[in-house]
Amino acid sequence: MNILSPVRRITSYACLLAGIVMFVAALFMDFAGIDNDNRGPFLVVGAILIIAGLYFFPTLKHHRTIINILFLFPLLFTFAVTVIIPLVLGIYYSFTDWTGIKMTEFVGFANYIKMFKQPAFIWSIILTFLFVVFNMILVNLVGFMLALLCTTKIKGLGFFRAAYFLPNLIGGIVLGYIWQFVFANVVTNLLNQQYSWLANTNTAFMAIIIVYIWQYAGYIMLIYITGLTTVPRDVLEASAIDGANAWQTLFNIKIPMIASTITICTFLTLTSAFKQFDVNLALTGGTGSIDFMGKYLTNGSEMIALNIYTTAFKDDNYALGQAKAVLFFIILATVSIIQVRISNKKEVEM
């Protein structure tokens, strides 16, 4: 054990003592209800002094490791409070009759059985999977094509990159209402239609896909641009000398060399499409008539995330909504893991 200087030892003890006193004083004032503006500064300064005292403490062999943990604690604590604990509690509440405030009894799998008996929920799952498939293909295709355009030697590349990325900066709710006006007025007048695209289930689903591509393709484009710019220029020059044309260079050199970028983009589009909520809510509100499983449904354009929201907050059935959310988490985690493994396998093959 290292013997540190007496000055460092005294500094450590002084910091620890002062930090503990200030920390305890702040907690005492808070619990005692004493209205004092010094509680916050006492708490912060006390915590800093305790950390400093532990850092200089002469008898702790792994005191630096302790300091690292202390500095990581706010982040780990926040992650636990906002993600881990709600996830565990949510799983527990899905097996109860939780009302959002309290629960009276444990109902087992009753909520899970009930949700699978709802044609509206089954339809939302099917619609979500269709939405994910279409968007994984189209968003990546459009984003990759925009990236190829924005890596060529044309004037105004900065403008084009900013213009394509700009829709991603608009919030989903605002975006939904903007496109709601576009489909209800502009598109209807251009096509000489009597009804808006949003009035029909099939065209409403197409409208959501169009809006999602318009919003997200620019973001995916930037990631593809990063991947394309990392392709070694000498490899491209060598292929040109060997007589490779643009298509051969694209499919035999560029795409294989950005396989890891493709994996990232497909993962991002998959998870984002699965969690689609705000555009779905603002654009159609999930409305749309359809016959499914012998039932007449009025939520023809409602996807899983919006169905969970409707169940919990509109229908005031928090336990059932939580059960749906747990199933949604399992589906999303499973599909994401499978997608990443398949993509990684293809990277090795390339």
Image (spheres, rainbow, N blue to C red):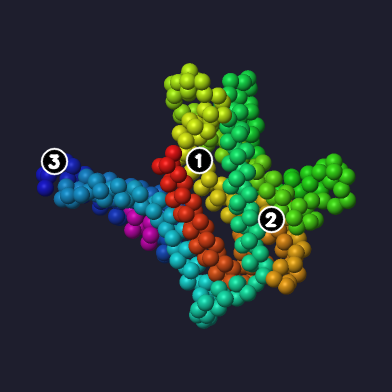
The residue nearer to you, when weighing 129 against 252, is 252
* 256 w.r.t. 80: above or below: above
Q: Is residue 71 left or right of residue 2?
A: right
Residue 262 badge? 1
Earlier residue among tags 3 and 1? 3
Residue 5's disc is: 3
Find disc 2 in the rendering and name its residue. 281
- The amino acid on which the numbered mark 2 sits, given as a three-letter code, is Leu
Q: Which residues are magenta?
A: 22-28
Q: Residue at x 43, y 46 (%)?
A: 345
Question: Which circle marks residue 65 in the picture?
Answer: none
Marks 3/2 in contact by CB < 8 Å: the verdict is: no
Query: Residue flagged by tag 3: what amino acid is it?
Result: Ser
**Is 151 in front, or is 211?**
151
Label 2 packing within 10 angstroms: few (<14), some (14-19), many (20+): many
Question: Callout 3: helix, strand or loop?
Answer: loop
Look at the numbered discs 3 and 1 and tell me whether their residues touch, using CB distance below 8 Å.
Answer: no
Q: Element at badge 2?
A: helix
Q: Note whether 308 is above or below 269 in the view shown.
A: below
Label 3 – label 2 distance at C-alpha? 65 Å
Residue 286, given in percent of the width and then of the height, sits at: 71, 59
Q: Residues within 10 Å of mark 3 (few under 14, many from 20)?
A: few
Nearest to the observer: residue 108 or residue 87 = 108
